[in-house]
Amino acid sequence: MIRLSLALVACLATPAIADEYDAIKAQAGERLFDKECHRCHSVEADRASYGPLLNGVLNRAAGTFADYPYSDALRGAGFVWTSGALKAWMEDNDGFLPGTKMRHVGIDDPTVQDFIVTYLASLTE
Ligand code: HEC
């Protein structure tokens, strides 16, 4: 009976812990985003800055933020921004999509990639 209750508690607690863990990762991701991306990308306003708006980019089709003057490469890319695509982009954007006009950022630390994606995901929830 005790074992059953413990199992029940573990089941109930797990989503809460996962949420808290994601919230912590998102906080760290926000600071990394401010350092690595914010000078070119807005997330606050419904507009682009030098780069396209990134609020809502997760699961958005690439190159489709309204009125942004994308490169031909990104406008015609025809894929959706999954977390995997965002990580590959951060690591080597011009290798991932030759012809993009985004300057190479080269973030190859998987933890940093993960934190930034978690932050971007938290903006769309
Ligand atoms: C020096 C300025 C600059 C920096 C720094 C920068 N970007 Fe960009 N980003 C751009 C530009 C310009 C584009 C548009 C590229 C094109 O049209 O080919 C872009 C495009 C993108 C896109 C495609 C969005 C869409 O609507 O399809 C994503 C995703 C993105 N950047 C993520 C990031 C992330 C994450 C970081 C930080 C790790 C970052 N960028 C850092 C300038 C920058």
Image: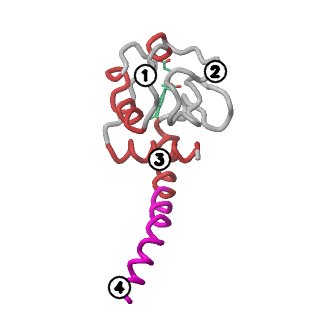
Circle 2: is it few (<14), some (14-19), or many (20+) Cα within 10 Å? few
Q: CA distance from mark 2 to mark 3?
A: 24 Å
The residue tagged 2 is 66
Sequence-wise, the earlier of marks 2 and 3 is: 2
Three-letter amino acid code at disc 1? Arg
Report if the CB atoms under discs 4 and 1 are less than 8 Å apart: no
Q: What amino acid type should be assigned to the residue bearing mark 4?
A: Arg
Give the Cα distance between marks 4 and 1: 55 Å
**Is residue 71 placed above or below 40 in the rendered structure?**
above
Mark toward the viewer: 4 or 2: 4
Mark 3: secondary structure: helix
Residue at image coords 38%, 45%: 112
Cα distance, mark 4 to mark 2? 55 Å
**What amino acid type should be assigned to the residue bearing mark 2?**
Ala
- Magenta highlight range: 1-22
Residue bearing the label numbered 1 = 103
**119 shown above or below 105:** below
Q: Is the residue indicated by label 1 positioned so its CB lies within 8 Å of ligand 1?
A: yes
Q: Does label 4 point to a residue whose CB lies under 8 Å from ligand 1?
A: no
Marks 1 and 3, the one that precedes in the sequence: 1
- Name the element at disc 4: helix
